[in-house]
């Protein structure tokens, strides 16, 4: 059984997004098949920034950073739902047993009014029931900040990044140029006791994003 609190057609949401001018300069690069591939200010994303924690009432720092670069980045909440039977991948990632529900928040991301990403975020139902996460509004400061205030600060994340062929729905919303794949980031965030408390499954227009990771080498003993 699925209980949906809000549902929107992503394409309909996009059509209602105001067209903002002036637009950034559009650059082109040769594509492998000889066509020109348009680059609309490809953004370098640093995944750690998306997990930053700020105080109550403060804006989401990732959005603030993009807007400092002149990018009008906006999230739209498409749906919240309680899923009594999550997919096997989500159940395993959250280490749930059979019958344990999850809460889904489905969002879209636009850059300067144009589509950039579709994002699904999942939580164990027991830690977010009765909180704004299960509500119908965007969360000021971002979900990681709210989780931290609830006692479930994200201490470690594991990202799995792949490129894949878009579905028809994804292609319709993201308006991908021909032969451009999706960039898919599947992230599991762990809190105290290494308990998984959040899973993010994001599909991004690959020609608009690049991901930059920082890490320290593991030294052999």
Image (spheres, helix red, strand yellow):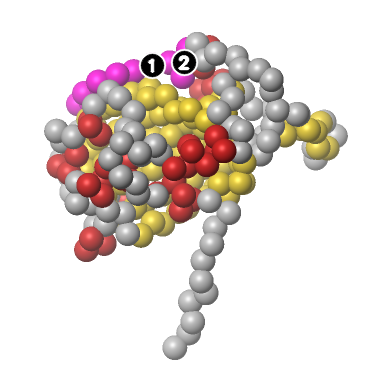
The local crowd at label 2, few if under 14, some if 14 to 19, many if 20 or more residues have their Cα within 10 Å, is: some
Quadrant in the rendering for residue 57: top left
Residue labelled with disc 2: 13
Residue 167 visible? The answer is no
The x, y position of residue 148, in whole percent, is 26, 49
Task: Give above or below for 197 relative to 122.
Answer: below
Taking the spot 76% from the left edge, 29% from the top edge, the residue there is: 26
Residue toward you, 132 or 57: 57
Position of the C terminus by quadrant = bottom left
Write the residue at 55% across / 28% down.
72
> Measured from the top left, where is residue 205 in percent x and y?
59, 34
Secondary structure found at label 1: loop
For residue 32, which quarter of the picture?
Answer: top right
Q: Is residue 144 left or right of 98 when viewed as pictured?
A: right
Instruction: Using the image, tell me which numbered label, if any, was put on residue 197.
Output: none
Q: Residue at x 25, y 20 (%)?
A: 5
Quadrant assignment for the N terminus: top left
Q: Is residue 218 left or right of residue 189?
A: right
Task: Give the residue pinned by disc 1.
Answer: 8
Asked if residue 159 is among those painted magenta in the image, a careful observer would answer: no
What residue is shown at x 66% (from left), y 39% (from top)?
Answer: 42
Instruction: Check whether the beta carbons of the residues at disc 1 and disc 2 lie within 8 A of each other.
Output: yes
With respect to residue 65, does 132 lie above or below? above
Please state the extent of the stretch shown in magenta in the rendering.
1-13
Res 190 → quadrant:
bottom left
x and y, in percent, of residue 115 in the image: 56, 25
How many numbered marks, from 0 up? 2
Q: Is residue 107 visible?
A: yes
Q: Position of residue 157 (x, y in %)?
A: 39, 56
Instruction: Of the two numbered discs 1 and 2 on the same chain, state the one appearing first in sequence.
Output: 1
């Amino acid at each position: 059984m699925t209980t949906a609190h809000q549902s929107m057609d992503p394409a309909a949401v996009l059509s209602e997004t105001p067209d903002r001018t002036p637009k950034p300069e559009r650059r082109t690069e040769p594509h492998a098949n000889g066509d020109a591939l348009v680059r609309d200010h490809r953004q370098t994303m640093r995944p750690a920034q998306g997990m930053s924690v700020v105080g109550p009432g403060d804006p989401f720092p990732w959005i603030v950073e993009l807007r400092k670069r002149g990018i009008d980045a906006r999230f739209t909440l498409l749906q919240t739902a309680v899923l009594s039977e999550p997919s096997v991948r989500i159940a395993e990632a959250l280490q749930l047993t059979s019958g344990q529900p999850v809460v889904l928040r489905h969002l879209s991301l636009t850059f300067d009014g144009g589509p950039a990403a579709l994002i699904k975020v999942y939580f164990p139902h027991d830690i977010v029931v009765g909180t704004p996460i299960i509500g119908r509004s965007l969360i000021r400061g971002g979900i990681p900040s709210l989780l931290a205030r609830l006692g479930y600060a994200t201490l470690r994340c594991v990202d799995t990044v792949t490129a894949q062929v878009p579905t028809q729905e994804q292609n319709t919303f993201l308006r991908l140029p021909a032969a451009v794949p999706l960039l898919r980031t599947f992230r599991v965030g762990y809190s105290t006791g290494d308990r998984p408390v959040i899973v993010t499954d994001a599909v991004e227009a690959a020609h608009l994003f690049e991901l930059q990771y920082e890490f320290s080498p593991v030294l052999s003993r």
